Amino acid sequence: EVQLQESGPGLVKPSQSLSLTCSVTGYSITSNYWGWIRKFPGNKMEWMGYISYSGSTSYNPSLKSRISITRDTSKNQFFLQLNSVTTEDTATYYCARWITTLDYWGQGVMVTVSS
Amino acid sequence: DIQMTQSPASLSASLGETISIECRASEDIYSNLAWYQQKSGKSPQLLIYAANRLQDGVPSRFSGSGSGTQYSLKISGMQPEDEGDYFCLQGSKFPYTFGAGTKLELK
């Protein structure tokens, strides 16, 4: 069974970088697409970007200058880095697999941006 | 970006009642629409993809319909385990965008 698990710090200071890891089991990240999504307080959701089976990436233009998604195929993990965070980046962050749509999601990790 | 307008924001249904949730897109999304259920503290679960295709393992009381800019999710016979948040996702044009969500409660 495909399983995804996010990990990373739950608290980040403003202006610093947010770094999260998505560990995938049961399926290779060298197939299909792998995305990051976040859910803000108040429940609005935002698609952040994805990394493909080949390692190519696509980002939401609203984040384009601050976001980077990379991967380590030897560990079957992919990563999110979001730079210059503000309190508006406080959200629950999810990783998910995309085949036609987002079919498997991680449990999510809550990240608070606060000094 | 394509705007997804989801309604209603909240809904209370009796056991066995049939309910519908709507998502309207700001432009044609060519049936590239999925529906999800999310329970508190859990990951979203895919219910419907490609507007009307039932995901494996999802009870048949869930169904999706629609085309163009108008889509709906129907639950035929509300069950206690159907309580939760529901949202739609358009996968037609990047950046993919979500509906604002519907909170479904058992009356």
Image (cartoon, rainbow, N blue to C red):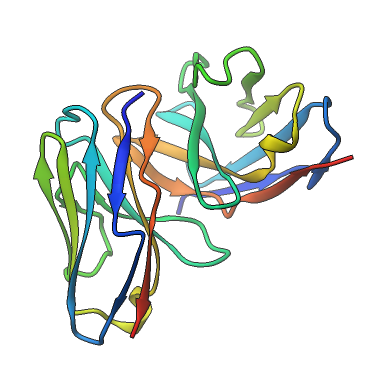
Closer to the camera in the image, A49 or B57: A49
Place residue B63 in its image quadrant: bottom left
Residue A30 in sight from this viewpoint? yes
Image spot of residue A109 (x, y percent)? 67, 50
Q: Is residue B20 above or below residue B52?
A: below
Q: Residue at x 65, y 29 (%)?
A: A80
Q: Is residue B41 above or below residue A86?
A: below
Q: Residue furthest right?
A: A115
Horizontal placement of B7 versus A73: left or right? left
Q: Residue at x 75, y 31 (%)?
A: A86
Place residue A90 in its image quadrant: top right
Horizontal placement of B45 versus B15: left or right? right
Q: Residue at x 65, y 30 (%)?
A: A79
Closer to the camera in the image, A84 or A109: A84
Residue A28 in sight from this viewpoint? no
Q: Residue at x 34, y 35 (%)?
A: A99
Q: Is residue B61 above or below residue A114?
A: below
Q: Is residue B45 above or below residue B33?
A: below
Q: Quadrant of the C terminus of chain B?
A: bottom left
Place residue B56 in its image quadrant: bottom left
Image spot of residue A31 (x, y percent)? 42, 28
Image spot of residue A40 (x, y percent)? 58, 45
